[in-house]
Amino acid sequence: MRISLSEWQARLPLPATDRWPQGVWDVQALARGTMKVILFTPRAKDYQTPHEQDELYVVMSGNGVLAIEGQSHAFTVGDVLFVPALARHRFEEFSDDLVTWA
C-alpha cells in the first residue's frame, strides 16, 4: 500500500466545526488493527491531549519545538519524534509549513 503526502495534504483543511472554527488540520490516512497513520499539519496552536498509544511523528516539512512532559525538543525536516503513551505533549513553537505523519 502507498500513501501519498501530496494527495492527503490536498484534503486539508477538513470543514470547520464548533471546536475547530478554522477547520480541522489532521486527517487519518490509514487504519489497520491498532495502527493508524495520520497527516498532522497544525496551524497557529496545537491542541493535543495525551494518547493511549505510543506515537511517532515523522517531520516532512517545517521545524519547531515539541514539548513532552515539560521538556523541549527542537526538531527539523527528516526528524522522527517519539511520544510515550499518556505523555502530555504539544508542538509549542513551529513554522507555518509544519507537516508530519503521526
Image (spheres, helix red, strand yellow):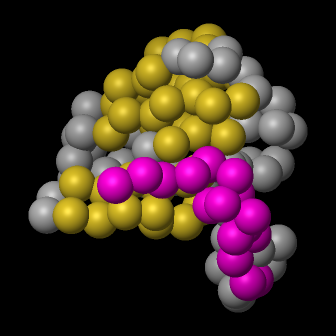
In the displayed structure image, the side of residue 69 where residue 91 appears, left or right: right
17 over 24 or under it: above or below: below
Tell me if I can see residue 20 in this picture.
no
Would you say the magenta stretch is mainly helix, strand or loop? loop
Q: Residue at the front extreme?
A: 1
**20 or 59, which is in the foreground?**
59
Q: Please report the residue visible at 62 percent of the width from the left and 48 percent of the height from the top.
A: 5
Quadrant of the rendered structure where residue 19 is?
A: bottom right
Q: Please report the residue visible at 23 percent of the width from the left and 54 percent of the height from the top.
A: 35
Q: Please report the residue visible at 86 percent of the width from the left and 39 percent of the height from the top.
A: 96
Q: Please report the residue visible at 51 percent of the width from the left and 42 percent of the height from the top.
A: 101
Tell me if I can see residue 76 in this picture.
yes
Q: Is residue 15 magenta?
A: yes
Quarter of the figure with the C terminus: top left
Residue 84, horizontal then vertical, whole percent: 26, 32
Quarter of the figure with the N terminus: bottom left
Q: Is residue 67 magenta?
A: no
Residue 31, horizontal then vertical, whole percent: 29, 65
**29 or 40, which is in the foreground?**
29
Range drawn in magenta: 1-16
In the displayed structure image, the side of residue 27 where residue 96 appears, left or right: right
**101 or 92, which is in the foreground?**
101
89 over 3 or under it: above or below: above
Query: How many numbered marks are there?
Result: 0
Residue 33, horizontal then vertical, whole percent: 13, 64
In the displayed structure image, the side of residue 40 where residue 56 appears, left or right: left
In the displayed structure image, the side of residue 30 where residue 52 appears, left or right: left
Residue 71, horizontal then vertical, whole percent: 48, 16
**96 or 32, which is in the foreground?**
32
